[in-house]
Amino acid sequence: MSDHQLRVSKIPRGTVIDHIRAGQALNVLAILGIDGESGETVSVGMNIPSDRMGHKDIVKVEDRELSQDEVDVLSLIAPEATINIIREYEVAEKQYLERPKRVVGILSCPNHNCITNENEPVETKFDVLDDGVRCEYCGTIVRDDLAAHIAAE
């Protein structure tokens, strides 16, 4: 394969998530709820050489555009990623991720004594910090491996 060939072909419509930090593509798939059983056509490239990042991951999902909630969660684990909406094989929209100030109902609190883990009807709420997130109820700060705290739907 020469440097001028595409590793994965263009998609007719859907979403391309580019510039994902190397090693995070599988977490991106988990956030999007893609497990291979739903029949979606997905292309995943991992540890692809990148001039800007050294190595990067890329995810192409055909026939699907991401919701703002999905984009907000992606910004927590892949803040440097770009979202490209593809229509008729061309980039129709390009979005750079911005971290939200707050996420609700997306992450689980690792503090077992937090009210959100006590079978109470309380939705988790986290303030987004520069270097992690802080639970609004118990103050627990999560700085590493945010993907491990994404609440399963």
Image (spheres, grey):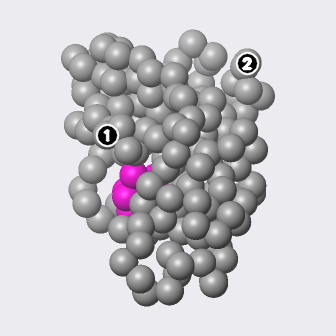
What residue is rendered at 49% in x and 50% in y? 103
User: Which residue in the structure is indicated by mark 2?
Assistant: 51
Percent position of residue 28, x then y: 50, 49
Report the residue marked by disc 1: 67
Q: Is 72 drawn above or below residue 4 in the view shown? A: below
Report the amino acid beneath label 2. Answer: Asp
Residue 108, position in %: x, y?
54, 68
Q: Which residues are magenta?
A: 29-35
**In-front residue for pair 42/52:** 52
Magenta run includes residue 135: no
Label 1 CA crowd tier, 10 Å (few <14, some 14–19, many 20+): few
Quarter location, residue 2:
top right
Residue under the point 52% across and 45% down? 102
Q: Quarter-wise, where is residue 20 in the image?
A: top right
Q: Secondary structure at mark 2?
A: loop
Please state if 60 lies on the left or on the right of 24 as rendered: left
